[in-house]
Amino acid sequence: MIELENVCFAYEKEIALRYVNLHIEKGDSVVIQGPNGCGKSTLIRLLNGIIFPSEGRYLYQGHEINEKALKDSRFAKWFHQQMGYVFQNADTQLFCGSVEEEIAFGPTQMGLPESEIQKRTEDCLRLFGIEKLRERPPYHLSGGEKRKVSLACILSLNPEVLILDEPLAGLDEKTQEFLIGFLKSFHKAGKTLITITHNRELAHTIGTRFAVMNEEHELNML
Ligand SMILES: Nc1ncnc2c1ncn2[C@@H]1O[C@H](COP(=O)(O)OP(=O)(O)O)[C@@H](O)[C@H]1O
Ligand SMILES: [Mg+2]
């Protein structure tokens, strides 16, 4: 489903990915670990189509993902709906006036019928236990609440792949447990997960395949 072939990426002169090869099948749960600055977040941005390989190829379901492909707005819409990306910092992702609007935003952009938008919004509010927050402005919520809202926003798009960058960082124990349970059920439903984490417990509970990046910006499967 996801294929990286000898992918390199550099910011100006700063190399961040060096000849990365990665093959992910539908239903895999891949955990990526590695020291700070090795290129994990860069890899995630690339998988999500925010940046593109400077060398090598990235294929998603057989389609090459590059700047040109994502200029086709129908293709870009499909691709971004397939890939759910949870930012390391939820603040950069939340911008609507209320939690409810925030969750409905993606489905509205997808052009879904009003009844479907309402159904998905209610389902996601319930799934994350945030019904009480529905009218609150997202930027005034606590860190854990924001994380739940940003996950709810992504899930309302019904993505095929969920990509998470340090999902447990800054969450209290109860919210962490809730999130781990949620990720397990997402994976059980046959969906694909890609998670960056330093948390060993999380890695072992949800991972089915493991990869490590090193300081040379190379990726190795374990
Ligand atoms: N926007 C950027 N501009 C220039 N260099 C960057 C940028 N983002 C990351 N880098 C550099 O690329 C390398 C990989 O960063 P990153 O992917 O964030 O690593 P990780 O997530 O593994 O900590 C680091 O050397 C970092 O300083
Ligand atoms: Mg990072």
Image (tube, rainbow, N blue to C red):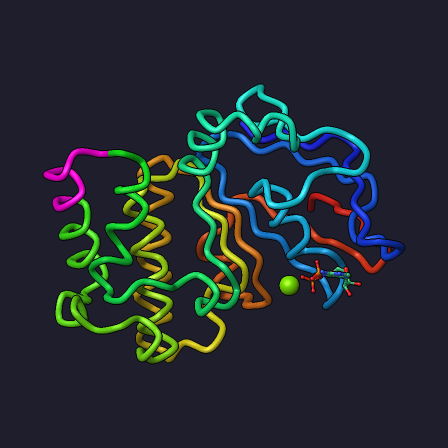
Residue placed farthest to the right in the image?
A: 13
Residue 90 sits in quarter: bottom left
Residue 43 in the image: state x and y as whole percent: 67, 48
Q: In the image, 116: left or right of 178? A: left
Q: Residue at x 50, y 60 (%)?
A: 87
| Foreground pick, 67 / 19 | 67
Residue 68 in the image: state x and y as whole percent: 64, 27
Q: In the image, 216: left or right of 156? A: right
Q: Residue at x 36, y 50 (%)?
A: 154
Predominant secondary structure, magenta span: helix
Residue 95 sits in quarter: bottom left
Total count of labels = 0
Any magenta on residue 59?
no
Q: Residue at x 50, y 55 (%)?
A: 164
Q: In the image, 174: left or right of 37? A: left
Q: Residue at x 58, y 19 (%)?
A: 62
Residue 211 in the image: state x and y as whole percent: 66, 48
Residue 35 in the image: state x and y as whole percent: 73, 66
Span of residues in magenta: 112-119
Q: Is residue 134 above or below residue 182?
A: below
Q: Is residue 54 above or below residue 204?
A: above
Q: Is residue 26 above or below residue 140?
A: above
